[in-house]
Image (tube, coloured by chain):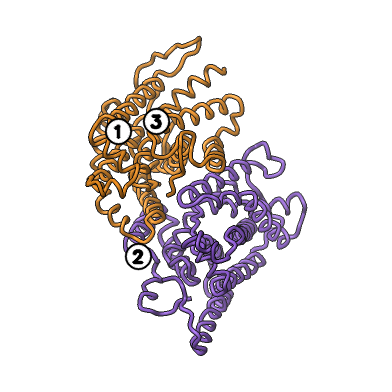
Amino acid sequence: MFAYSLISGILFGIFFGFMALGLNLIFGVMEMVNLAHGDFVVLGGYVGITALNSWHINPLVSLIFALLLFFVVGLGLFFPLVPRLSHSRDPEMLSLILFFGLSQVLEALMEIKFGVNPESLPLSVFGNSSWHFLGQSYQISWVVSALISLLMILLTYVFLYYTPMGRAVRAVMGNREEARATGLPVKRTSAIIFAIGIALAAMSGVLSPLMIGSIDPTSGLGLTTIAFAIVVIGSLGNPLGSVLGGLVYGISLMLMQTYLSSWSVLVPYLLLLIIVLVRPSGLLGKGVRHV
Amino acid sequence: MFNPQWDTNTPNRLRRRLVNGVIPVLLLAGFSVSPLVYANQAILFQMMAFMALAQGVNLLYGFTGYLPFGYVGFFGIGAYGMAISIQLLHFPGILAVIIGGLLSSVIAMAFLPLLRLSGAYFAISSLAAAEVLSHIVSNSAFIHITNGPYGEQLTQSYHPLTSYVVMVIVLVLTTVVVIFIRNRPFGRALMAIREDPVSAAMAGISVVRARSVVWLLSALIAGLTGALFGWHMSVFYPSTVFDLNISILAIVFTLFGGYGTVTGPVLGSIVLYGLYNAIGISDPQYFQLIYGLLIIALVLFLPGGIISLIQRRGNYVP
């Protein structure tokens, strides 16, 4: 029992770390919390479900499609919304409210388009076999989702640490004003990171029905809270922190589901409250970033 | 732009006092007379409830800068405090409502450490706190106290007229409190803290105490409103009184009207709750779409709400 919850916790944790990655990137670069993050995850979920049900497209293909589509969507949202905010009186609070409005709009549009009933992907979408490990068997779709998530986290890491663009991103994360003073294209960097953040959210969303069971238009806010908890646990603005936060969340969730299942819904909320009150800088953090 | 300009010109000051005093009188008269002209009492009651909640959000956000996404937690605790007082302690309705409000303040005291956070940290953590409260109340472990997920039936103490009258009183008192705070040194101290806590502390303002007072006060408002709401409905479930949309609507009403003013939340609740009744009940998603777009437009073009359109011309708005 314990080994099973631990290993499925790790599989879920990697997935949730990936799910929170976009929120972390956008927060790190722009110091804005994208409250619509969870809604982009749900939108990605609907892309995967619609592609499979209507055109029999495998979710593996929809993943790439969601990534590209929402990269464009992200760019399209960035330019009318974000630069205007940066010049306002109180950009931190106003961006929170703005993205909250965006989240309401997306939720309403999804309800109009897809209705309010929960929808899901068949768990057998990646084949019917299961993965045997240490005497237990695990859903193959969980393993595939975790592997894809791990791959995407590694790619993001390589992008941030081994490309010139990634170096610019880290410079902006470190100090926006100094980055601008050195002549880095801060606005362009922000736009690209914003688009990548939303694209990654939607991409993780394609896998989300497999991991969280089913999605409906109102799932977004709960997912945003989970993602925020993970990002805060693992330290804001640190992509590797997302993995750590995801693992903490995934393993605690699975242990709670095994041993105290009626209280397991409380896991993300309690984890968030504990971490913000006890160690607001996160497990890997050096200092608190204020939003 | 939210600070009334103080001047020593006495007739002007008198006029302002008069304008401020008119608002609660208008609310009292309006909601006392309107049931005679307009038959749907439930809508009037809910409009008052949302107006009181919007004022509570206004106290917190408008005067201290804390945006409480989890404000509904206090509302739900108020409703359950009231229901438990009636079911288990057999208190009369009005006393049960007061117990509900007080219980909500007690819970707020337990959550005082949240005020150490700011910005998005506070907003999302308060949401998490409300979810925790909601799941504790609806957990079947407490089925003997809260009846778990099956909700509360208070049909034996159902009293629509009394609860309506008490709601009018609570709304008027809330409005008076907001007017009072806004025009007293305490309100100016709060705004100083909102703009710059460090300088405010250096000027001799007790930052922690002032914030805590507002936090407990706004919890009391939400608790009383929730208790009255539950009493008026007489049948409710955890999902009704801990519905996150309640906080969302209260926040939207406040932002739309204009935070940090007295008239803003009143105006926002009347206009948007009216709109909600026109289209929201049959097509909630279209209403949600409209207010979502409204929020985006407000943030980009009119962060002070519609009241700021009048203030912009140099007029005094309470």
Task: Read off the residue under disc 3.
Answer: A240
Residue B29 seen by the camera: yes
Residue A82 image point, x, y percent: 30, 52
- Residue B143 percent across, percent down from the top left: 68, 40
Which chain letter goes with mark 3?
A
Left or right of A190? Residue A250 is: right
Horizontal and vertical percent for residue A209? Answer: 40, 31
What is the chain letter for disc 1?
A
The residue that label 1 is drawn on is A160
Residue drawn where x is 75% and y is 49% of the image: B88
User: At 49% across and 64% down in the image, what residue appears?
Assistant: B62
> In the rendered structure, the residue with mark 2 lies on which chain?
B
Label the orange chain with its letter.
Answer: A
Chain shown in purple: B
Query: Which kind of residue does numbered mark 2 sit on?
Result: Leu
Crowding near pointer 1: few (<14 within 10 Å), some, many (20+)?
some
Dot in front, 2 or 1: 1
Choose between A285 and B179: the one closer to the eye.
A285
How far apart, in angstroms, are the residues tagged by discs 2 and 3?
Answer: 39 Å
Residue lying at 58% horizontally and 42% vertically, measured from the top left:
B132
| Image-based side of A135 in relation to A162, left or right | right
User: In which image quadrant can residue B17 be found?
Assistant: bottom right
Mark 3 vs 1, N-terminal side: 1
Q: Amino acid at mark 3?
A: Leu
Label 2 sits on residue? B302
The part of the image, by quadrant, that contains residue B105 is bottom right
In contact (CB < 8 Å): disc 2 and disc 3: no
Q: Amino acid at mark 1?
A: Leu
How many residues crowd mark 3 within 10 Å: few (<14), some (14–19), many (20+)? many
Percent position of residue A11, x then y: 44, 23
Q: Is residue B79 above or below residue B275?
A: above
